[in-house]
Image (cartoon, rainbow, N blue to C red):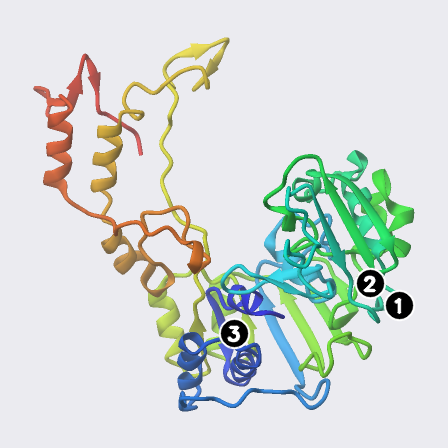
Amino acid sequence: MNEHELRTLLNGVTLGRVTRRWFIERMLALGVAAPLAAEMLASVGVAPAAAQPTFTPKKRGGGGALKILSWLAPTLLNPRLAVGTKDWDASRIFYEPLASYDGDGNLVPVLAEDIPTVANGLLARDGRSVTWRLKRGVTWHDGKPFTADDIVFNWQYVMDPATASPGVVGLQAIERAEAVDSHTLKLTFKAPTPFWMAAFCGVSMIIPRHVFEPYRGSRAREAPANLRPVGTGPYRCVDFKSGDIIRAEINPDYHVPNRPFFDTVEVKGGGDAVSAARAVLQTGAYDYAPYMAGVEDVILQRLEAAGKGKLDFAFGGDITHIQVNQTDPWKEVNGERSSIKTQHPFLVDPAVKTALSLLVDRASIQQEVFGRTGIPTTSWLNAPAPYAAKTPPGQFDVEKANQVLEAAAWRRGPDGIRQRNGVKLKMVF
């Protein structure tokens, strides 16, 4: 698990005290700089010293059982057929990508030996191909070797229309995938491809050819391994009941030395976000619970008062926002309303859009609705930090909004509603 995965994992989740300490140690082992790690250390009574010792595990296992309550219960464990975060998160216990991302968006090798760059000659300067050198000595949970042929198969499996894989978007830029040798993969793209890492990195996890090849295409959803994964990851599946529970045991042949830490992992599904938070923060029945974003902060604070656990936040790129119709819903084109061939009579006007932005009280929404679970923003691009847009903070100014509309000749009518050329500024929200 790398820094990015840790931060994603901690996004609005609850952690029990023992589990929380392990996460901190893992962060330190990864070299995660002080702000987040120091804050977490302080919360479990460890002083954030100037130089914390690096946590280096001496053996595999020894961490006991990790109990997770995921109220958004996973329903299948094939990352190539997964349709949402809950299934990807669950699959990641068993399956791995070539590389993942750290907190700054940099690639970190997982099944790859190293990261392709122009400098090391593995990434073509014209963006039309990339070569991956694979880590040697990696085996699937059934003991079969992991090779470049497995990745070629993943491309073939996903791109087969009969498979109907939701992951086709990340791989459709590839023209050809070929195994140069058993541990070297070359991907050739149809055109220059800046986001070449979309293929087989992050949630684009790799499944084994020898297990899934008989179920390629129209039989994809019949594969027993959809519910009984055979991966390269740190844990092996013991039991999985769709929408209910996952039980996993340590993989004794995991390719990362002295990993993983926990001996077993249990993921229990069902319930709702509030009850999941209560099971960690108030009763201590579980160590960890994800997907807390929809719970009001006042409820979370009340549950935290029990002292059994604490909420941690790692903000990502998703935003809560209002989208306005850019087309005309009152005009039909070939029987279609809001046709792309039309324009809205006033929502495309820059003055109106500026006024609307000035009338959103972001700070109050954050303070009164989201609390600690939200940060005001005026940008679509908020993470990772090196790429976040440096936009000014949102301004709430009713008078300025009025001035902008006046300057654009939107005048108040007898009914108090602003209008121009017979068009009223009247919306349904």
- Can see residue 41? yes
Q: Report the amino acid beneath label 3.
A: Ala
Q: Report the amino acid beneath label 1.
A: Asp
User: Is the residue 255 above or below the residue 97 in the image?
Assistant: below
User: Is the residue 272 above or below the residue 286 in the image?
Assistant: above
Residue 338 location, quadrant = top left
**Residue 411 vs residue 105: left or right?**
left
Neighbours of disc 1 within 10 Å: few (<14), some (14-19), many (20+): few
Q: Position of residue 85 (x, y in %)?
A: 60, 54
Q: Report the amino acid beneath label 2.
A: Val
Query: What's the residue at 72%, 89% (across, down)?
Result: 59
Q: Which residue is mark 2?
A: 230
The reply to whether the C-beta atoms of the residues labelled 2 and 3 are less than 8 Å apart is no
User: What number is the disc on residue 279?
Assistant: 3
Element class at badge 2: loop
Q: Which residue is mark 1?
A: 142
First along the sequence among labels 3 and 1: 1
| Tag nearer the camera, 2 or 3 | 2
Neighbours of disc 2 within 10 Å: few (<14), some (14-19), many (20+): many
Element class at badge 3: helix
**Residue 196 vs residue 223: left or right?**
left
The reply to whether the C-beta atoms of the residues labelled 3 and 1 are less than 8 Å apart is no
Q: Position of residue 39 (x, y in %)?
A: 40, 79
Q: Position of residue 351 (x, y in %)?
A: 22, 29
**Residue 288 vs residue 209: left or right?**
left
Give me the C-alpha separation between circle 3 and circle 1.
Answer: 35 Å
Neighbours of disc 3 within 10 Å: few (<14), some (14-19), many (20+): many
| Depth order, front residue of 418/303 | 418
Residue 94 location, quadrant = bottom right
The reply to whether the C-beta atoms of the residues labelled 1 and 2 are less than 8 Å apart is yes
Give me the C-alpha separation between circle 2 and circle 3.
Answer: 31 Å
